[in-house]
Amino acid sequence: MVWKKAIDFVKHIYTMTAQFPKEEQYSIVSQMRRAAVSIPSNMAEGAARHSDKEKVNFFYMARGSLSELDTQIEICESLGYLRPGDKNASQEQMDELSAMLNGLIRAQRE
């Protein structure tokens, strides 16, 4: 379920960044999309690992990519690239994903 929500968040980031200025295509847009894709990718890689310690490390990396996106969204807002509601919609999804990832990490560590 967490992985599916992460996939949905990737779609949200791709849709949101599609309207950014063309000169940002190979900078902030590319960086944001890679960070977004990294979230479910790291979760999948972690789930395939055998030890709980390895799984937790990959879940931490997914959470790190989520934090990276949080900062990038703040930057985009300050540059005026976001449409009304983009930041709030993103923040809601990031908060939910963060809580779910924290739950996964806790479960694997116990």
Image (spheres, grey):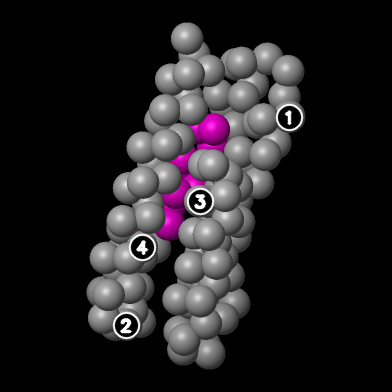
Residue 11 quadrant:
bottom right
**From this viewpoint, is residue 40 visible?**
yes
Residues drawn in magenta: 59-71
Secondary structure at numbered mark 2? loop
Which mark lies nearer to you, 2 or 3?
Answer: 3
In the depicted structure, whether residue 110 falls above or below residue 26:
above
The answer to which of marks 2 and 3 sits earlier in the sequence is: 3
In this view of the protein, which residue sits in the foreground, 102 or 76?
Answer: 102
Residue at the disc numbered 2: 83
Label 3 crowding class (10 Å Cα cut-off): few <14, some 14-19, many 20+? some
Residue found at x 60% / y 32%:
58
Secondary structure at numbered mark 3? helix
Number of marks:
4
The answer to which of marks 1 and 4 sits earlier in the sequence is: 1
Q: Give the CA separation, mark 3 to mark 4.
A: 12 Å
In the depicted structure, whether residue 88 falls above or below residue 35:
below
Q: Which mark is residue 5?
A: 3
In this view of the protein, which residue sits in the foreground, 86 or 24?
Answer: 86
Q: Which mark is residue 90?
A: 4
The answer to which of marks 2 and 1 sits earlier in the sequence is: 1
Q: Name the chief secondary structure element in magenta.
A: helix
Is 16 situated left or right of 45 in this image? left
Q: Which mark is residue 13?
A: none
The answer to which of marks 4 and 2 sits earlier in the sequence is: 2
Residue type marked 3: Lys
Secondary structure at numbered mark 1? loop
**From this viewpoint, is residue 71 visible?**
no
